[in-house]
Image: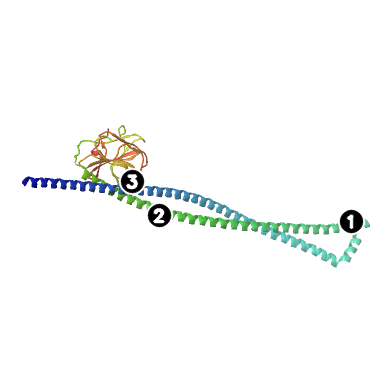
Amino acid sequence: MNRRKTLIFLISSVLMILMALEAFAFDINEDKKKLSNVNDKINKVGQEKKENEKKQKDITEKIKILEGSIIKLESEIEELNKNVVETKNKIELTKKELTKAQENIANKNDILNSRLEVMYKNRDVGYIEVLLDSTSFEDLLTRLDMVKKIFKHDVELLKYLKAQRDLIEKKKVTLENHNSQLIALMNSTKQKKESLKVSRGQMERVKQQLVQNHKALEKEEDKLIDLAKRIEDQIRRKQSSEKYVGGKMAWPAPGFSRITSPFGYRIHPILRVKKLHTGIDIGIPYGKNIVAAQSGKVIHSGWLGGYGKTIMIDHGGGIVTLYAHNSSILVKEGQKVERGQIISKCGSTGMSTGPHLHFEVRKNGEYIDPQQYVKKP
């Protein structure tokens, strides 16, 4: 009877353990699903950021083109304004010439009319005087011919003066028409300029909205990355039963020791805001080897938001290392790796300004200065 009770107890205990293990495994799988969903969202936000940046670049180029067109139109308006002033000056000068010509015509006309009037009133006396003063018939004819020539010259001069007046009048009309055309063209150019300025203002507002959207996406991405980190830490704590072996880690970039950006607060090279730099950046040429700093298990292998192509390795005892911005990844999630094993190739994926390795060390989810664990060669 006691043996039967003992057997039943053992069977019940085993079943409870199996159920607990199954529940534990289910719990971890649920966490992994959550992590996968969060990473999908991070990738989606990253893609939206790229599209936003492309739109910003495109609209910035369009604004530059508009500004160039506005500057060109301003130059044209300035030149047209000079031409209008010059033409107005010419019109004023022509008006003076026209007034002078009309005065000359009036004076000459008055002289001619006076002569004709005198000749008309004293026509008989004039002929007698010509006859009396003449010394001969030939002299008489000469005198009469001279009077005729003087009269003809006055008439021709009057005709010439009137012709000059007509030419000046035409010149004045031509200049006035030209001036009207210049003013119309200048007004049209001003309207084009104002239209371009309105378009530029609209584009500036669109660009500003894109900038605001980009900032919102960055905040969302930061929150998602932080959430992913917490889920990863939770999975790691549930999975990890090993302790960190301790000691200094291997340098993750064999042959390259220049730290281009240390751990700590800095002005972000892309976002241009003060942020915590959560690791160290090591300058490495594109395609060079990246190695595991310590033995452990790969808990992430793939794209991770602004980190780009990323590997995370759990070394036990709450210690996790992260290797970001890779061009290619050579290990899979769940794979065991050894200290110094090549795990990826250097690149510039994600939010990066050029090929380098961003290397992090996390302890129980907290960022630690990697130089506490690794030593430059």
- At label 2, the amino acid type is Gln
Q: Distance between the Cα atoms at labels 1 and 3?
A: 117 Å
Q: Which residue is mark 3?
A: 305
Residue 43 appears left or right of 313: right
Q: Which residue is at a point 52% across and 51% down the rendered structure image?
A: 69
Are discs 2 and 1 less than 8 Å apart at CB?
Answer: no
Residue 236 location (% of width, % of height): 23, 44
Are discs 1 and 3 less than 8 Å apart at CB?
Answer: no
Which residue is at the far left? 2
Neighbor class of circle 1 (other Cα within 10 Å; few <14, some 14-19, many 20+) is few
Mark linked to residue 309: none
The front one of 293 and 374 is: 293
Would residue 2 be seen by someone viewing this image from the given angle? yes
The front one of 154 and 296 is: 296
Which residue is at the far bottom? 121
Residue 209 location (% of width, % of height): 40, 54
Mark linked to residue 142: 1
- At label 1, the amino acid type is Thr
Residue 108 location (% of width, % of height): 77, 61
Residue 199 appears left or right of 358: right
- At label 3, the amino acid type is Gly
Q: Distance between the Cα atoms at labels 2 and 1?
A: 100 Å
Q: Which residue is mark 2?
A: 209
Neighbor class of circle 2 (other Cα within 10 Å; few <14, some 14-19, many 20+) is few
Q: Which residue is at a point 8% across and 46% down the rendered structure image?
A: 4
